[in-house]
Amino acid sequence: MAVRVVRRPELTFWEKLYLPQILSGLKITFRHFFRNLFLHIAHQLGRLTHLPASVTVQYPEELRPLMSRFRSRHRLTVRDDNTPRCVGCMLCETVCPAKCITIVAEEHPDPNVEKYPIRFDIDLGVCVYCGYCVEACPEDAIRMDTGILDLAAYSREAMRLDIHELMDPTLRKPIGDCKLTFPHKCELHGGEMKGSWEGVAGE
Amino acid sequence: MIEFLVIKVVLAGIVIFVVLNLAGFQTWVERKQSALIQDRIGANRAPIFGFRLLGLFHGLADVIKMFTKEDIVPAGADKTLHALAPFFSVFFALVIFAAIPFGDSLDVRDIPFGDHLNLADPIIDLQVAKIDAAVLYIFAMLSLGVYGVILGGFASRNNYAIMGGLRATAQMISYEIALGIAIVGVIMVYGTMDLSELVRAQGQMVWGWIPFWGIVTQPVAFFVFLTAALAETKRLPFDLPEAESEIVGYFVEYSGMKFGMFFLTDFLETIVVASLATTLFFGGWQVPFLMPDGFHFPWGAELPVHPLVYVLLGVASFSIKSLIFLFVFMQLRWTLPRFRYDQLMDLGWKGLFPISVVNVAVTGVVLVFFGEAS
């Protein structure tokens, strides 16, 4: 097998002189500078808005489009009567590799449902966003499709989502009033049982 | 005497006010200009009463942040020198402006109500200190500025900091020589070291229409000066004392406003270099075809100008030229990558130094043979 000699590209005289190369570099940066300056001014006047002046996404105002399969903050899907679809089968809690899900199940008045969660916590500080809970759920009761990414909090405690936040993705800590009507261990009232099946619409 | 002092203090106040504000403003320019070059938007937050003004208040926010930050002095550091170093840097960068003339002599009697002041000497030089050897003074101060850097590196008791300081020293020595010799050519042509005289000498015309500026008489010296002066500012492509990706720099161990002062020094030195380039090579406050009594265009047209307007036009001319230089420096800073250290030394000693020496020799020969004409 013949040896192939790779020659390093030799610099020409003008490249060695360095000054023309500086000028060609400056040409590029000046072109970008004046193009963007012109476009920014045109945008302020409401013109040429189809030509973007920057390639960056202005994050808090603009969100990047997410893939439909993107795994973001969890939510619990609900039945028509605003009770969780979850039947407390513990499959998600079992499959969770990070062990961040805590479920306490209780008997459901409907014999066809059997169980439902009176407590459902996900510790997002521990969660690895693998999505196994969504895969494991036989009832399509948990999903990760809220599109919520800004999950930062000031304490570990604030990273724990309880059933209130999981059932209503718009809620953020601190949560004001408990709006759940079915019996549950209410984190907002120190873990006491709150609500009753009489309060649930349709019962 | 009191009168003289008051005038000087007012002039110094104006210069320091303008220069410091310009340095602060440059933080904004740097952010926005780099953003535009890199197809970004740049800093646009920090509102005051809801006004964002394209993020202009970010510099203000920076200063508030730096003043309220904890000031950490590393254990084992020389506390006195550690505290002194940033002040050295800023001080020597600021005193340079004393010698730079930013306008022609102003006759107070031309200002409305100016003759009511009854000054003993109504002619004011728009220059804080009229020094006969201003060029020497400026180079002395530029060289002393490196003491702040080397002290900062030395007093921190940090190997990387001292490496940054050493790099800065070596770089300053290598480039200051080229810088000084490049200037010698200019001094030979105009025959003076007094900057205001030097600017005045640049007011003549060659063949009646080319301004007799330093760039016309000494183009090679201009390029050497520009390169060496960029190296003096310790900014890209010559930011080896800093070199964030390699050694973080001579101010690794500085925090809060002490770091801010080193940062400020960089901007101040950029302004120094811009105004020096203007003064030495672009005619300082000279406006082309503008004589003290008005415009004299080469095609014969004349436009008389009030003496006060003449002085103001000069100040505006100086400011605009300096700002253009600042803009170009900023553009260069965001265009070129950093030199490798051996390349830096090569360029300084094998490139700029011989070129500047040859330039002086050629200038001398030309002056001997054709010198009487100019």
Image: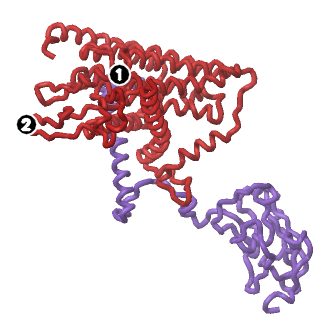
Chain colours: A purple, B red
Q: Is residue A4 visible?
A: no
Vertical relation: A200 (above or below) A169: below
> Disc 1 or 2, which lies upstream in sequence?
1
Residue at 28%, 21% (x, y): give it.
Answer: B198
Q: Is residue B231 visible?
A: yes
Quadrant location of the N terminus of chain B? top left
Residue at 50%, 40% (x, y): give it.
Answer: B24
Q: Which residue position is annotated with label 1? A: B225
Viewer-side residue, B46 vs B42 = B46
The picture places residue B55, in percent across and down from the top left corner, at: 50, 51
Q: Residue furthest bottom?
A: A202
Viewer-side residue, A47 vs B221 = B221
Q: Which mark is residue B300?
A: 2
Viewer-side residue, B358 vs A85 = B358
Viewer-side residue, B83 vs B248 = B83
**Image quadrant where residue A3 sits:** top left
Inspect the image, locate mark 1, and give the three-letter code of the amino acid beneath it.
Phe
Residue B364 lies left or right of residue B165; in this view the side is left
Which mark lies nearer to you, 1 or 2? 2
Disc 2 chain ID: B
Inspect the image, locate mark 2, and give the three-letter code of the amino acid beneath it.
Gly
Vertical relation: B260 (above or below) B363: below
Judged from the image, the secondary structure of the residue bearing numbered disc 1 is helix
Disc 1 chain ID: B
